[in-house]
Image: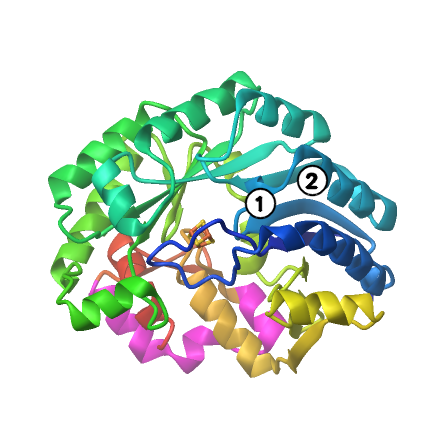
């Protein structure tokens, strides 16, 4: 079945160096970029009969800003040749502050990129160094200013908190500095360490300290308080926006089961209750597409029960929560009948609220959203 309101994600799997906390798939062999562009363009052909048009495009990674303007143009031209792109599409690109210039941003704007997500993470050079980022706070400030000068009026900033040695005062200072730029969107992630990351090894072997549970809660609550006081809407556990219309339209598709197509190594896709994901290795991916084969690694067909659970999990992470009637119509699951006692208990503990047919998390509930989904 073709789908009209889908999102398109393009994964650019290259990074000049690996950040200590990162578990995303990327490699540093940037000489493969030209071959990668050809493969992504080739991969589009497999999906022409499944996806007709997109109204969001997200170029993420990895580090998309390692691509030249010409390479981004090649990708976007191919997208336009293969699919219909809604004229009001949100077209986002992730950028690393260490890579960019005013001219680069101006060129991206001309290509139709209308939203930037800048991976600033911190304005503190010591923290940036600890995280293994290859940019400085000065470059972060430059990147944001240059993006504004290039006429970007929808800019998101990514930040990380809960870093070893960072106390709540340091974090407040970071938020204050961030707010001085008045970004349209903010993603504030708590540092968490996957076992495969270099920082995890330091944590295990060298006694690296992470925030204790109560400190993490303090960071979370403080972040929400400061940003909502500044007029931002806390619309998802880690995400804040200046107005509802500036929410990440692309990410919303992940959170409400809207179809999306992911192109590139390790990219995930979702359509008609089916999820599939590509081979992760860049060379394996390039070889597959080069031989005219679809680079899908595996797929799974989700049952109604699995989709209902996911909807519960995702809904408990967002301010809008779960529309109970819609949930019942989609999945045949009457949450209020099936989980009445548990929901009553959660309401009593001020973790969820029930209003106008919606079940949604309170701020305290959002702080423990993942465990709420286990109800
Ligand atoms: S730049 Fe992003 S994707 Fe690349 S290593 Fe750092 S966190 Fe991971």
User: Is residue 202 found left or right of 74 in the rendered image?
Assistant: left
Q: Residue 215 carries which label?
A: none
Residue 135 within the segment the image draws in magenta: no
Give the residue drawn at x 20%, y 49%: 219
Say whether residue 2 is visible. no
Tell me the quarter of the picture where residue 287 sits: bottom right
User: Is residue 42 found left or right of 35 in the rendered image?
Assistant: right
Residue at the disc numbered 2: 72
Looking at the image, is mark 2 or mark 1 earlier in the sequence? 1
* Residue span colored magenta: 325-349
Residue at the disc numbered 1: 64
Tell me the quarter of the picture where residue 50 sits: bottom right
Give the residue drawn at x 60%, y 69%: 281
Q: Mark 2 touching mark 1, by CB under 8 A? A: yes
In the image, residue 171 sits, relative to residue 176, either above or below, namely below
User: Looking at the figure, which quarter contains the N terminus?
Assistant: bottom right
Residue 330 within the segment the image draws in magenta: yes
- Callout 2: helix, strand or loop? helix
- Callout 1: helix, strand or loop? helix
């Amino acid at each position: 079945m073709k789908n009209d309101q889908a999102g398109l994600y393009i994964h650019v799997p290259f990074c000049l160096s690996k950040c200590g906390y990162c578990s995303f798939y990327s490699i540093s062999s940037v000489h493969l970029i030209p071959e990668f562009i050809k493969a992504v363009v080739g991969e589009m052909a497999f999906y022409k009969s499944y996806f007709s048009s997109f109204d969001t495009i997200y170029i993420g990674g990895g580090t998309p800003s390692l691509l030249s303007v010409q390479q981004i143009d090649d990708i976007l031209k191919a997208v336009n040749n293969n699919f219909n792109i809604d004229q009001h599409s949100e077209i986002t690109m992730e950028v690393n502050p260490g890579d960019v210039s005013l001219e680069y941003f101006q060129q991206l704007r001309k290509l139709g990129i209308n939203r930037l997500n800048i991976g600033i993470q911190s304005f503190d050079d010591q923290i940036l160094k600890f995280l293994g980022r290859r940019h400085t706070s000065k470059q972060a400030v430059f990147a944001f200013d240059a993006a504004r000068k290039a006429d970007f009026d929808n800019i998101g900033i990514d930040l990380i908190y809960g870093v070893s040695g960072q106390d709540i005062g340091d974090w407040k200072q970071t938020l204050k500095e961030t707010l001085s730029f008045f970004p349209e969107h903010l993603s504030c992630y708590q540092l968490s360490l996957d076992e495969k990351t270099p920082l995890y090894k330091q944590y295990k072997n060298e006694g690296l300290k992470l925030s204790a549970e109560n400190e993490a809660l303090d960071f979370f609550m403080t972040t929400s308080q400061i940003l909502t006081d500044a007029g931002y809407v806390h619309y998802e556990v880690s995400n804040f926006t200046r107005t509802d219309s500036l929410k990440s339209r692309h990410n919303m598709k992940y959170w409400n089961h809207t179809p999306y197509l992911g192109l590139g190594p390790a990219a995930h896709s979702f359509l008609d209750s089916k999820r599939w994901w590509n081979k992760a290795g860049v060379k394996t991916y390039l070889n597959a597409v080069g031989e005219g084969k679809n680079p899908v690694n595996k797929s799974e067909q989700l049952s109604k029960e699995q989709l209902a659970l996911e909807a519960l999990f995702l809904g408990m992470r967002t301010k809008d929560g779960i529309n109970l009637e819609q949930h019942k119509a989609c999945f045949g699951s009457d949450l209020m009948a099936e989980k009445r006692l548990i929901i009553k208990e959660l309401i009593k503990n001020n973790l969820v609220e029930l209003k106008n047919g919606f079940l949604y998390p309170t701020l305290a509930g959002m702080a423990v959203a993942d465990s709420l989904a286990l109800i």
